[in-house]
Image (cartoon, helix red, strand yellow):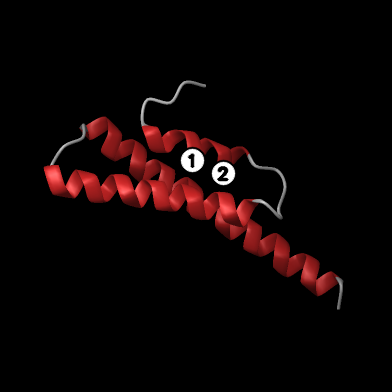
Amino acid sequence: MLADYVWEEVYAAAILETDDTKLPNRLHVAKAAIDDRLHELQLDHGGSPEERQAIGDALAGLNVVRRELERRSHVEGSSNA
């Protein structure tokens, strides 16, 4: 997959990660890359509407993955009790 935006590469790595032990770090790195890009966009008022939409979609996707990871961690923790 060729990323249109620099942050998309780390976002894709987070979304596609299947190892729950690596996932929290991947989510953190992706969120940081998106936050850095949002900061750049605020400074120069740049970016296309398409990129801004893609960022919104990516943030929503990261939140879904983060909630699923938390749910799985809670379920596994409950079953080990």
Label 2: few (<14), some or many (≥20) within 10 Å?
many
Q: Residue at x 16, y 37 (%)?
A: 46
Find residue 49 and name its label.
Answer: none
Q: In this view, does 80 lie above or below 35?
A: below
Find residue 11 and name its label.
Answer: 1
Outermost residue on the top side: it is 2
Q: Residue at x 53, y 36 (%)?
A: 12
Tell whether 28 sits left or right of 58: right
Q: What element carries label 2?
A: helix
Residue 44 placement (x, y as % from top left): 13, 42
Label 1: few (<14), some or many (≥20) within 10 Å?
many
Report the Cα–Cα distance between label 2 and label 1. 5 Å
Q: Is mark 1 on a helix, strand or loop?
A: helix
Residue 43 placement (x, y as % from top left): 15, 48
Find residue 14 and name its label.
Answer: 2
The C terminus lies in which quarter of the figure? bottom right
Q: In which quarter of the image is residue 74?
A: bottom right
